[in-house]
Amino acid sequence: MTMFLTLFVLLTAPVDISGTWQMGLELEHVIPVALVLTQDGTSVTGTLTMPPHGNGQRQEVKLSGELIDGTLKLSGVIDEARQNETVVLTGRLQDDGSLAGSVSVRDHDMSWTAERLKERK
């Protein structure tokens, strides 16, 4: 009975995706992006750090959304854009612990994958 209860708890324990993720946006080539997430229950907040663009500065996009049943939905606004542009990121937790999905900015849709970086001791 104890073993069954332990297995049940492990299988039903909520998933926590908090941490730093190495994300790759897939276009003609893979663009490396940093994704830092914090989870509180089903609520998820974070920052997407894009590599330097035209002005030589990195762009940070603050994200907020939710993780429900392994499906991640986040959105945020790129403040430095000529017009405020919304980023919509959707994804799914994979069996191997990685994340994969799509991100939309304006009329561009891109696939992405991400692996959580291990914490340094």
Image (cartoon, helix red, strand yellow):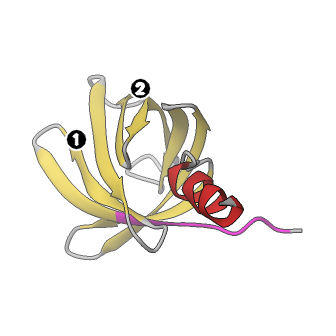
Is mark 1 in CB contact (under 8 Å) with mark 2?
no
Which image quarter is the N terminus in?
bottom right
Of circles 1 and 2, the one toward us is 1
Front-most of residues 54 and 8: 8
Provide the residue span drawn in magenta: 113-120
Q: Earlier in the sequence, mark 1 or mark 2?
A: 2
Does 73 sit above or below residue 43?
Answer: below
Q: Examine the structure image and report whether residue 114 is included in the region drawn in magenta.
A: yes
Q: Residue at x 45, y 74 (%)?
A: 96
- Residue depicted at 64% across the width and 67% down the height: 117
Residue 43 appears anywhere in the view: yes
Residue 6 vertical position relative to residue 31 in the rendered view, above or below: above
Drawn side of residue 34 relative to residue 119, left or right: left
**Quadrant of res 27:** bottom left
Check disc 1 and report its element: helix, strand or loop: strand
Callout 1, which amino acid?
Val
**Residue carrying label 2:** 79
